[in-house]
Amino acid sequence: MRFLVVDGNSILNRAFYGIKILTTKDGRFTNGIYGFLNMLLKIEEEYAPQAVAVAFDLPAPTFRHQLYADYKAGRKGMPEELAQQLPVLKELLDLLGYSIVVREGYEADDILGTLAKQSPKGTQVYLATGDRDSFQLVDEQISVLYTATKMGRPQTVCYDPERILAEYRVTPPQLLDIKALMGDSSDNIPGVAGIGQKTAGDLISRFGSVDALYEQLDALDIKPGVKEKLRAGRESCLLSRELGKIDCAAPIETDPEQYSKQPAKGRAAAALLADLEMFQMIGRLKLDETAPQETVREQPELIVREETQAASLLARLRSDKVSYFTRTSDGTYFVALDGAVVALSANTTDFPLFEREFFEDENIAKYACESKGLYSYALQQGLRLSAIAGDAGIMGYLLNPNASEYSVQRLAQEYGVPVPQGIAAQEAQQAAILPALFAVLREEIEKNGQTPLLADIEMPLIPVLAQMEHEGFAVDKPGIAAFGSALEGEIDWAEQEVYNQVGYRFNLNSPKQLGEALFEKLGIPAKKKTKTGFSTNAEALEGLQYAYPVVADVLQYRTLTKLKSTYCDGLVKVIGPDGRIRSTLNQTETRTGRISSTEPNLQNIPVRSDLGRELRRFFRAKEGCVLVDADYSQIELRVLAHIAQDTVMLEAFNQGQDIHTITASQVFRIPPETVTPLMRSRAKAVNFGIVYGISAFSLSQDIGVTRAEADRYIKSYLEHYAGVRDYMERVTAQAKEHGYAQTLFGRRRSLPELHASDFNTRAFGERVARNMPIQGTAADIIKLAMIRVSRRLEKENLLAKLILQVHDELIVEAPLEEEPAVARIVKEEMEAAAQLDVALCVDVHSGQTWYDAKG
C-alpha cells in the first residue's frame, strides 16, 4: 500500500511564499490554497497513493514547550493573509474527501512520524513536507518528498536513505544528532554554542552520535576549542536533541486503511472553489459535473435544434432585434433562442445569404464571446460586420484584469450563471450561456461605473485591431536575412574577444562556465552568488561593464545573439506569402490596459541600441505607399501633470517648456539656461522614475552617481513638485481604502498587495498604485486615438490604413498622394483623443521604412 502523509502547515507555507499573491475580486487571499492544491495533486499524480492524511499544527503548546519554555520563542506569527487561508483550506480538503489529522500537544511533524513509523510492514510511506526535520524518519519503507515552489511551479525531490547518505554523509537518524549540536534558529533550539553545521556534520560523520561523542570526549582527536565548546554545551545539546526528536507515538489512529480518500462532496467543493475563483481547479478535480449549488442554481439540459431554413432564422433574429451566438471554425452558427440553441450549418442551402445579411444588419444587436475573430473572418470574406453590442471576454477583462483567461465557461462559473449539460459541442454550450451571462456582466460593469469605458473604448477598438491584424506590415525578407548574416560576423568577433581576455574557450551561453571565467579565472568582483554559482544575469553584469571590457564584450555578445535569433531568424519564419508580417494584438493580456503584441511581438523590437534600430529599416511601406509615424510626446508625464495638478509641471507644459530642463533647473537649483546636457539627462531619469517608486539605489545605478547624490535628487524633486508628492500619497491611500487603483476613464486594477504583511510585497503594491492611473490612462488615450484615427480615415474615404501600435506610437500605411492629409489627420485625432489640463503633443514623420519614418 502507498500511504501519503502531508505536512499541511509546511506545504501551505511553502505555497504561500512560493507563488505570487492571488486574491478574489473582493480581496480574499488564495495563493496559499491554490499552491497547496497544485502541490498535492502533482504528488498524487506521480505517486498514486491509496491513502492520504493531511496533518496540521494546533495553536496550543506542545510537550516541547514544557521541556523548554523558549521553544520557538521569537518566531514571527503567521501573516494575516496566510492565516485567513488556513481554515478555508481545511474546509476544502474535507469536502474533497481528505482526512485531516490534528492532536493537541503534538506538532504536524509528530503526526507524520507516528503514521510513518507505525504503518504496517510493507506499506510504502511518503511524507510530503518542506521541512527537513522529517529526514530523520527516512528508512527503507519511508521516503520524504521534499517540496517547494520555484517560479510558481511545484518542485518535489524524493529523499530515501541513499540520497540522505549521498547528500549529508550520514544516515537519517544521525541528522537528529547533527541538529542537536548545531541547533535550529527557526525553532529557537539552542544546540551547542559556537558549533555550526559543517562542524556538527563532521563530528557525527566521524564519531557516529552525540552519545558516542560525549562518552569519550576527552580521548577524541578534536581541536581543543571545539572540545571546550562541546563540554560547556553538553546539557544544551542533550536538550536540543529531545526538542528536535520527532515523537512517533502520538495518540492518533495509525491504520493507513482509515485514511483512504473518501468521495468528494462535489457540489459543495465546487461551490467553494468557485467562491475562491479557482475555476480551472474545478475542472482539474473533475468537479464540473457536480456544479456548485451556491454558485449555479441549476444545470438545465441543453436542447440543440437543427435549423434547415436560414431565412426563417434570420427573420426571427430581425424580429427579436438581438442575437446571442457563437461560430465554429467549420462555419456552423449556434444561436440561443427560447431556452434552446439553434444550430445552422454552413451546408444549409441559403446559408451564404444568411451570413451576409446577418452580419450587415445594423438592427440586430449581436452578443458574442470572441468578436475580434468574427471581425477578422468578415474581413477575409469581404463582409461588413455591424452592431456587435457585447463581447463577454472584454467585459470579463474589465471586471477582473487579473484573471488568466476569459472563456464563457469560466465567466459563467465566476458569475453564477447556469451551465447547461448534456452536449458535446462547446460552442453550443457557450451560446446557451450567453444571454444570462451578458445580463450579469452588464450589471457588474454598470455597478463599477465602467459602461463608458466599455462602450467608448474597448468595444470600438475590437474592429480596429482586427483590421490591423488583417493588414499586417510589409517587410524586406532578403534584407532581414542579410542583416542576420552580417550579425554572425559581429557575434564571432565578440565571442573571440571574450575568449582572448579569459585565455581559453568555454561555453559562453553557460551561466556556470561564464561565472567561473569572469569571477574565478579573471578575479572580477562578483555582485551576487547563488546556490548554483555566480550570478551572470544582466543586473549582475551591467554595473561591471565600464570597469571590465570583457564584461562589456559578454553583454555585446548577448545583445547580438538575441538580435540574430529572436528578431532576424524569428521574423523571417513568420513572414506571410504576401511578404507581410501579421502580429496578434491582444486586448485582454495586460493589467494596465495596454495592448500587447504576440507571434511575433513587434512592440518589443529593440530601439535603444543602434543595431536594434537598424531592424526598423526592414519594415517598409508597400509599393506606391509611405509610412506615417506619429508618436505622443511625453504622454505619461502630461497625464501625471493633469492627475497630480502640479502647478510647476502644468505651467512648464502649457508654456511649451522642456520638462526635463525645468526639472534639472529645480533639482540642481540653477537657472534653466545653465542646465547642461548631463544635468538634463539625469533629470529625465528622475522624471520618469520618481512616480514609479524608483529608489535612490536604482537611480544611482541608472545615472552613474552615488546613492547619496541620487537620494538628494529625489528629495529635491519632491520638494519642488509638491503636487506630484501629494498625488503619490493621496493615490496610495485611496487604493488602500478601495482595494484598487483606477485610471481617468474608470479602468481598475485590484491591489491586494497593499494589505500584505511583507514589506517588499506591500511596497510593490504602492508602486503600482502610483503608476497604474498614469500608465493605464495613457493606454486608454492611445486606444481612443486608434479609434479616432481609424474612423477619420474611413470617413474621409482614404485608402490609408492603421497597421501598427507600439506603446505611444501609431503607424499608418498611406498611398503617396494621401500622405499630407493622413499626417494632418493623425496629428489632429491623436491630440484630440483626451481633454487634459495640458495639451497632448504628437510628433509626425513619414518615410519609406519604419526607420525613416521614426525620425
Image (cartoon, rainbow, N blue to C red):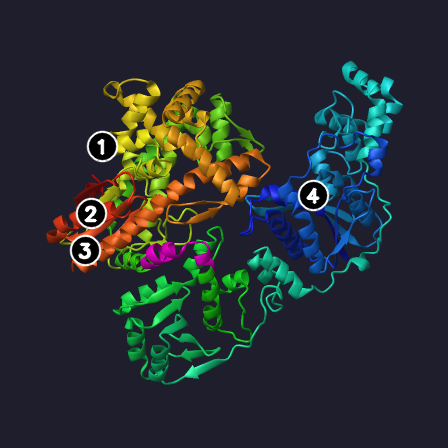
Q: Residue at x 46, y 56 (%)?
A: 447
Instruction: Give yes or no for contact between labels 3 and 2 (Cβ–Cβ under 8 Å).
Output: no
Q: Residue at x 82, y 31 (%)?
A: 241
Q: Position of residue 396 (x, y in %)?
A: 46, 58
Q: Amino acid at mark 2?
A: Glu
- 512 w.r.t. 323: above or below: above
Quote the CA–CA distance across marks 2 and 1: 18 Å
Quote the CA–CA distance across marks 2 and 4: 60 Å
Q: Earlier in the sequence, mark 4 or mark 3?
A: 4
User: Label 4: which residue?
Assistant: 10
For this view, does 837 lie left or right of residue 216?
left
Residue 456 inside the magenta-drawn segment: yes
Q: Earlier in the sequence, mark 2 or mark 1?
A: 1
Q: Position of residue 469 (x, y in %)?
A: 30, 57
- Label 2 neighbour load within 10 Å: few <14, some 14-19, many 20+: some
For this view, does 417 lie left or right of residue 501?
right
The answer to whether residue 255 of the structure is visible from this angle is: yes
- 335 w.r.t. 21: above or below: below
Q: Position of residue 166 (x, y in %)?
A: 70, 37
User: Label 2: which residue?
Assistant: 828
**From the viewer's perspective, is the residue at label 1 or at label 4 nearer?**
1
Q: Amino acid at mark 4?
A: Ser
User: Label 1: which residue?
Assistant: 656
Q: Amino acid at mark 1?
A: Gly
Q: Earlier in the sequence, mark 3 or mark 2?
A: 3
